[in-house]
Image (cartoon, helix red, strand yellow):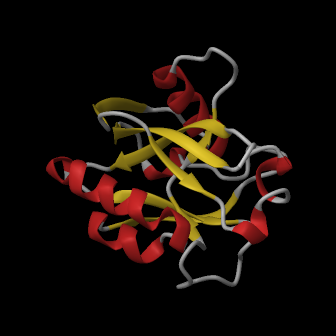
């Protein structure tokens, strides 16, 4: 496959109770319990952007606040390939999938700071706190292995 992977960062955002923020994709509003309808915040990196700066920027863009501190980092990069039917359509048609640097973060603010409506084109339309072990059931099939690895690596932060 000739298409490259898109550089990306992801956030496993923990609250004080050890729960993780998951958000429902705005393009899947009826996917209440469907895998892939809910996901962790993640997004592309800008050029030479430092992954630690990128994850905080992505939080601000996607959930309206970067009031968090990085408390852990997945050792290495994880990647996934898009299923064949999405190649050329998803991710602007320029990527075969994503290579991702994932971080565990502790949310330092109040729930009222989480605002999905600040971006003119919001990626998410709802959010909730979830148990870390729920991640594998929320992930779309081609991202499931990543969510399982994250749940294992970041369990100490619950």
- Horizontal and vertical percent position of residue 111: 45, 52
* Vertical relation: 70 (above or below) 15: above
In the image, is 48 to the left or to the right of 104? Answer: right
- Horizontal and vertical percent position of residue 157: 19, 47
Q: Quadrant of residue 85?
A: bottom right
Q: Looking at the image, can residue 154 be seen?
A: no
Q: What residue is drawn where x is 77% and y is 50%?
A: 91
Which residue is nearer to you in this view: 11 or 79?
Answer: 79
Q: What residue is drawn where x is 44% and y is 67%?
A: 144
Q: Residue furthest front?
A: 1
Which residue is nearer to you in this view: 140 or 84?
Answer: 84
* Vertical relation: 150 (above or below) 48: below
In the image, is 146 to the left or to the right of 97? Answer: left
Q: Quadrant of residue 46?
A: top right
- Horizontal and vertical percent position of residue 48: 63, 14
In the image, is 51 to the left or to the right of 58? Answer: left
Q: What residue is drawn where x is 46% and y is 73%?
A: 138
């Amino acid at each position: 496959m000739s298409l490259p992977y898109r550089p990306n960062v992801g956030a496993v955002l923990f609250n004080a109770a050890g729960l993780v923020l998951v958000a429902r994709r705005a393009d899947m509003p009826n996917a209440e319990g469907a895998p892939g309808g809910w996901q962790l915040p993640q997004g592309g990196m800008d050029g030479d952007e430092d992954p630690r700066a990128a994850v905080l920027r992505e939080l601000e863009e996607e959930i309206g606040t970067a009031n968090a501190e990085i408390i852990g980092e997945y050792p290495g990069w994880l990647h996934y390939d898009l299923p064949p039917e999405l190649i050329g359509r998803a991710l602007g048609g320029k990527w075969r999938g994503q290579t991702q640097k994932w971080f565990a973060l502790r949310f330092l603010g109040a729930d009222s700071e989480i605002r999905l409506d600040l971006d003119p084109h919001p990626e998410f339309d709802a959010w909730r706190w979830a148990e870390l072990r729920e991640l594998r059931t929320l992930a779309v099939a081609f991202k499931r292995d990543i969510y399982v690895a994250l749940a294992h690596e970041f369990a100490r932060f619950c």
